[in-house]
Image (spheres, helix red, strand yellow):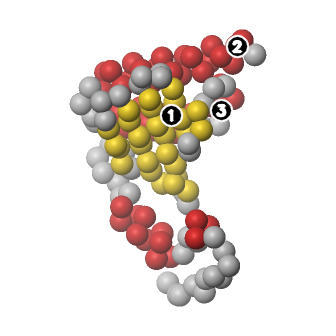
Amino acid sequence: MGNKQVNQDQPKASLVGAKAQSKLENIFSPNGNFDGRLFVSDEKVTYTYIDESEILVWHLDCEKQALYFKGHCLTHFADLESNQAGVSKFKKALFSVERADYFLKTLDKALASIEAGSDEN
């Protein structure tokens, strides 16, 4: 591992050097049945993990029955087609939390709503 020179004019978000990657790997190392972190409140769940060289975030808002991916509310099935593996990882991760049944049922409702919304357009 050699030292990389970093162009100071680049935005910090685009910098993914060896040090940054190793820190991310330390934070998001495999843990049980999924690789990532879950943040759970009464009505919301956020799942963050690394996929190749990108940090991905899924968020479920149970009050709104809405599913978000990378900060965007998913409203069309086309949004899900290319992210089926991510949805599966999110579901698998949800099995590890208290009230998993509630969150999984809400996720299924959100997915059905996305599919139904796509049928109307």
Q: Counting other residues with Cα less than 10 Å from the Cα at mark 1, is it few (<14), some (14-19), or many (20 or more)? A: some
- Residue 21: x and y in percent read 48, 69
In this picture, residue 99 sits left or right of residue 114: left
Task: Give the labeled residue for mark 1.
Answer: 87
In the figure, residue 69 lies in which quadrant?
A: top right
* Labelled disc at residue 97: none
- Secondary element type, mark 1: helix
Q: Counting other residues with Cα less than 10 Å from the Cα at mark 2, is it few (<14), some (14-19), or many (20 or more)? A: few
Task: Give the labeled residue for mark 3.
Answer: 79
Residue 85 visible in the picture: no
Q: Nearer the viewer, residue 61 or 96?
A: 61
Amino acid found under the numbered disc labelled 1: Val
Residue farthest along the left direction in this orientation: 98
* Labelled disc at residue 119: 2
- Looking at the image, residue 70 lies above or below residue 7: above
How much space separates mark 3 and mark 2, taking CA atoms?
13 Å
**Which residue: 55% across, 60% down?**
53
Q: Counting other residues with Cα less than 10 Å from the Cα at mark 3, is it few (<14), some (14-19), or many (20 or more)? A: some
- Residue 115: x and y in percent read 62, 18
- Secondary element type, mark 2: helix
